[in-house]
Amino acid sequence: MKTFLRNNGLSICFFVLFIAAMAGQILFGFEEYNKELMELGAPSVSVSSYFSTGHFIESTFENWESEFLQMGLLVVMTIFLQQKGSSESKDFDKDEEVDRVPSATRKGAPGPVKKGGLILKIYKHSLSIVLFLLFALSFLAHFYGSLKDENEQLSLKGKPLETASKYITDSRFWFESFQNWQSEFLSIFAIIVLSIYLRQIGSSQSKPVDAPHRETGE
């Protein structure tokens, strides 16, 4: 057990933080939603009912959508684009380990590498494929939740409901998306540029403390 925790400490820590933050979102989102219902003269809902509301679905997936988008773009853009001096960039002036040709004879090579063929071709791009697939699914869930929340509010106000074909161009939906996208792109820009000049000893996201500013990569 001790070895397992040591070997998986980073993922475990962030998963625990995710669960804690999700619990906080549910708690305060539930209270906020019931406040909105009270203002509209509607009865409050239970916690279990809250999970199926547009309010919960929209607020959850609009954030997941932006996270998967920024990570997918970072993975793909670092293939073709370089930032001189950044720990987040490859050095195009030398051979990088990530660009080496997969070898089935390499010790510990994953199964798809040993199988070769189409499976290997897909596996070589599997990280970006899955990240963009998760983005697409989150985007659809966000759209569904946002539309549902909009119609729940319209229904309580006695107004006509929105259709999916009309709501896809609605300013509210795209405002929800872009307000999250811009923050994710800013955070990636910040780590790319700041890692050129600043250091954090012991972190894989930083260059060695004594590395020159113009040295690219870790």
Image: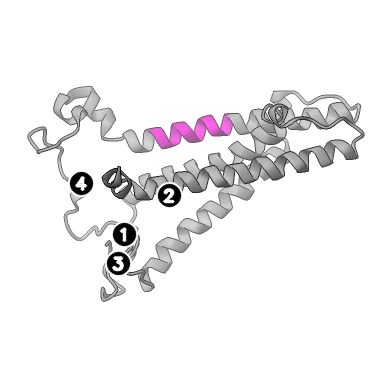
Looking at the image, tell me whether mark 2 or mark 3 is earlier in sequence order: 2
The quarter of the picture where residue 108 lies is top left
Q: Secondary structure at mark 1?
A: loop
Q: Residues within 10 Å of mark 1 (few under 14, many from 20)?
A: few
Over which residues does the magenta segment extend?
130-140
| Residue nearest the viewer, comparing 67 with 79 | 67
Residues tagged 3 and 4 counted as in contact (Cβ below 8 A)? no
Q: Residues within 10 Å of mark 2 (few under 14, many from 20)?
A: few
Mark 4 surroundings: few (<14), some (14-19) or many (≥20) residues within 10 A: few
| Distance between mark 1 and mark 4 Cα atoms | 19 Å
The residue where tag 2 is placed is 13
In this image, 59 relative to 72: left or right?
A: right
Label drawn at residue 99: 4
Instruction: From the image, tell me which residue sits under label 1.
Output: 204
Q: Taking 35 as reference, is 162 above or below it?
A: above
Q: Position of residue 117 (x, y in %)?
A: 18, 24
Label located before the other in sequence (1 or 4)? 4
Residue placed most toward the observer, 185 or 32: 32
